[in-house]
Image (tube, rainbow, N blue to C red):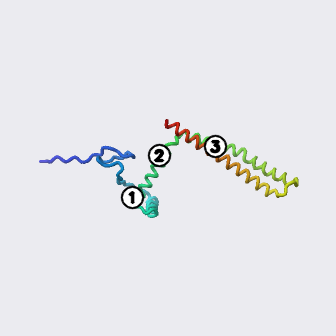
Amino acid sequence: MRHAKEAMPTRSSSNEGGNPVAAGTSPSRLLPVSAKIEGALSREIDEYAKAHGITRSRAAGQYLTIARETLRGQEGVAAGKAEEILEAIEGVRTVVELLGPSSLGVMRLLSHWATQSGGLKVSEDELLAELRTVAADEWEQVLSEAERELHEAMRKDRTEGRQ
């Protein structure tokens, strides 16, 4: 006569990644994972483990955690928003291409004319170098302000999107 088999534990819930977790298993308990990876990545994980004095398994887990965070971070940028940003960058590039050569030409002419009049005690090359330094400082300031405004707008967009 056949005996009824005892029921095996079922996989009744899932962890954060959507992978099944055995019934009665704590969600914080580490679970084994098997994956085939490239040799270069395997060596990199081994080197990371050795450098940090941790096991290969823990190093691989940290790599996966970082990958998960990176993928979640990418979800925050909508495809439409990325398109808008790329279009804005292209617009700025067009403006710089239009204004850049004339700005550089004006600097060259100013330095040439200023030194030709004899009122300055510096050479044309020295004056041009000074003009370029000042222009570079101004440009960096404009870029940092634009970057700050972009970050503020993105932060505002994210907070409005959550509400």
**Which amino acid does the dot numbered 2 rest on?**
Arg
Seen at 45% across and 49% down, the residue is 68
**Which amino acid does the dot numbered 3 rest on?**
Glu
Q: CA distance from mark 1 to mark 3?
A: 45 Å
Residue found farthest to the right? 118
Q: What x and y, as percent, mark residue 99?
A: 73, 45
Q: CA distance from mark 3 to mark 2?
A: 27 Å
Q: Which residue is mark 2?
A: 72
Seen at 35% across and 54% down, the residue is 32
Sequence-first disc among 3 and 2: 2
Q: Is residue 137 left or right of residue 75?
A: right
**Which amino acid does the dot numbered 1 rest on?**
Ser
Q: Is residue 105 left or right of residue 16?
A: right
Sequence-first disc among 2 and 1: 1
Residue found farthest to the top? 163
Q: What x and y, as percent, mark residue 146?
A: 64, 44
Label 1 SS:
helix
Seen at 74% across and 53% down, the residue is 132
Task: Judge the density around disc 3: few (<14), some (14-19), many (≥20) Cα neighbours within 10 Å.
Answer: few
Label 2 SS:
helix
Depth check: 4 or 21 in front?
A: 21
Q: Which residue is mark 1?
A: 57
Q: Is residue 42 left or right of residue 92?
A: left
Sequence-first disc among 1 and 3: 1
Q: What x and y, as percent, mark residue 121?
A: 84, 57
The residue mark sitting in front, 3 or 2, is 2
Q: Which residue is mark 3?
A: 90
